[in-house]
Amino acid sequence: MLSQSDFIHYYLMNENDQPHLSISKLSTLEKKSCKDSEYYASLLAQAFAVDSKLFQLPPDDFAKNIDVFLANQRSVHGKALTDLTPIEKKSSQVETLANALSNFLEDQLLANKMKPGDKLPSDRNLAVLFNVGRTSIREALKVLSVLGLINILPGQGTFIASDSSEFFLTPLSWTFFLGDKNLDHVISVRNVLELESARLAAINATLEDLNNLKLIFEESKRAYLERDFQHFLDLDLDFHLSIAQCSHNPILSNLLQTSRKLIKHISQSGMLSIDNLNAVYKEHSLIYENIFQHHNDEAVLAMKNHLENARIRYSL
């Protein structure tokens, strides 16, 4: 949407505020590559804080994926202020209040005073009940929403999550998970769950389980080969949760879903690059093949390698 002059002014200026290239040179680059193409691509990659290999994609693939890479970097560099998660901006007071609200709702469910899907009292009434301000109540409710305990529907109200089993599993560990300072602990717990999930999946998976896992893996493979990177990334959680379902341990599956959700909200670091996406696909393929062949030791080893590489890739 920018003119060539504005594009150069915003993204292709040197340290002395002089343009790296002329408008005629940019026009040439837009039409065909030249000996300086890689140099200017590296300058743009640096300006946008994206992987330089993005500019080596065919035009259609570039257009399809540019938003994926730019959205990731906006979150990394803190420019998307409206996207800050409740966990990132909570205080210790909000943590304490969220814990109290969680216990309150659990007691209400156990006493049959409320049931999954019921609407919560208004934030005004909750503020009176807990003797705090409405702003604090809203922040605490956002935390519970991130954890999947409640659903906040704009214009309709706040409702207890319909999956009551997840509601009772999550409070067992959510206070431990919360907080940037606990990210290392969250990752350690997630890794233990992932490794056991892979081991049990390779041992316990039925033909139906493997067919479901195959459907997700094949869809992920298709997204990868078609360079639909956003869809490929969206399927990452589905792939890991499908493995957990193959384990036939519902508690493990629920805890794994919670820990992965929290890691996503707590950590916005790391570089999304084409090399990283290629590596994830290869690692997923190896995990899938070993589970499908019921090679439990190899599946654990493949998952361990995947988790260690992910920690490096995303600076966790």
Image: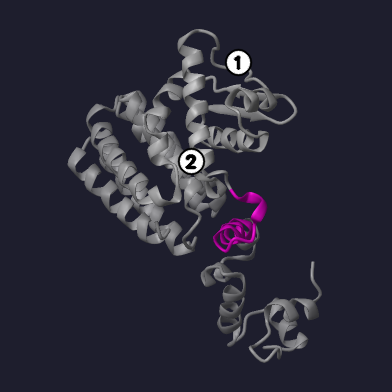
Q: Quadrant of the C terminus?
A: bottom left
User: Can residue 147 be seen at all in this image of the molecule?
Assistant: no
User: Can residue 205 be seen at all in this image of the molecule?
Assistant: yes
* CA distance separating discs 1 and 2: 36 Å
Which amino acid type corresponds to the residue marked 2 in the rendered image? Glu
Check the image and tell me how it is coloured.
Answer: one colour
Residues packed near mark 2 inside 10 Å, few (<14), some (14 to 19) or many (20 plus): some
Instruction: Point out which mark residue 39 bears.
Output: none
User: Could you say where residue 107 lies in the image, as x and y percent from the top left?
Assistant: 47, 16
Helix, strand or loop at mark 2: helix
Which amino acid type corresponds to the residue marked 1 in the rendered image? Asp
Residue denoted by label 1: 118
Q: Quadrant of the N terminus?
A: bottom right
Instruction: Point out which mark residue 219 bears.
Output: 2
Segment tinted magenta in the rendering: 65-84
User: Could you say where residue 237 lies in the image, as x and y percent from the top left?
Assistant: 45, 40
Foreground pick, 36 / 164: 164
